[in-house]
Image: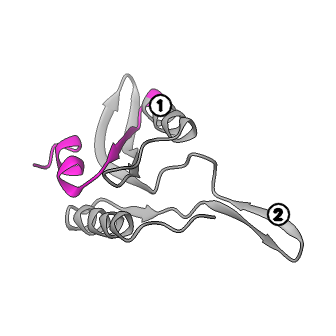
Amino acid sequence: MTQRRGTEQATVNAILKFLALHHIPAWHMRTGATKIGGRFIRFGAVGMSDIIGVLPYKGVVGQIWIPGRFLAIEVKSAASTLTAAQQGFLSQVNWAGGKAFMARDVATVAKELGLS
């Protein structure tokens, strides 16, 4: 498992604080793999976003009451790019009606969520 750069981790923390200030439940997802006692253990799904949460939303879509919307944010540093698996995860979330995007800073999150 590769070590995250300090700036990317700081951005994850800043985004989580921003979401908490707006009463949006969100969690930092740790994904990867390791060997424990000679066994290969994978945790999290390949391509899963750094931050997942639930956007507060109350309303009716068609005839279905929707209490909230799945949120996925892939955090990247200025030099990083999305992997195919990460892009695929974001696309699946958006296709299913969630809100998923890549962010390099809090300002992007605010803009994507209409909070700026």
Q: Is residue 59 left or right of residue 27?
A: left
Q: What secondary structure is marked by label 1?
A: helix
| Residue furthest top as drawn | 62
Q: What secondary structure is marked by label 2?
A: strand
Residue range in magenta is 95-116
For marks 2 and 1, the one nearer the N-term is: 2
Q: Nearer the viewer, residue 73 or 76?
A: 76
Give the CA separation, mark 2 to mark 1: 28 Å
Tell me if residue 101 is in the magenta stretch: yes
Q: From the viewer's perspective, is residue 94 above or below residue 76?
A: above
User: Label 2 belongs to which residue?
Assistant: 40
Give me the residue at 79% from left, 70% from top.
35
Q: Residues within 10 Å of mark 1 (few under 14, many from 20)?
A: some
Give me the residue at 22% from left, 44% from top.
113
Q: Quadrant of the N terminus?
A: bottom right
Q: Position of residue 114 (x, y in %)?
A: 16, 43
Give me the residue at 51% from left, 32% from top.
92
Q: Is residue 56 left or right of residue 21?
A: right
Q: Nearer the viewer, mark 2 or mark 1?
A: 2
Q: Amino acid at mark 2?
A: Phe
Q: Nearer the viewer, residue 43 or 52?
A: 43
Q: Position of residue 19 (x, y in %)?
A: 26, 61
| Residue furthest bottom as drawn | 37
Give me the residue at 30% from left, 64% from top.
11
Figure coloring: one colour
Q: Residues within 10 Å of mark 2 (few under 14, many from 20)?
A: few
Q: Amino acid at mark 1?
A: Ser
User: Label 1 belongs to which residue?
Assistant: 91
Residue 82: image tag: none
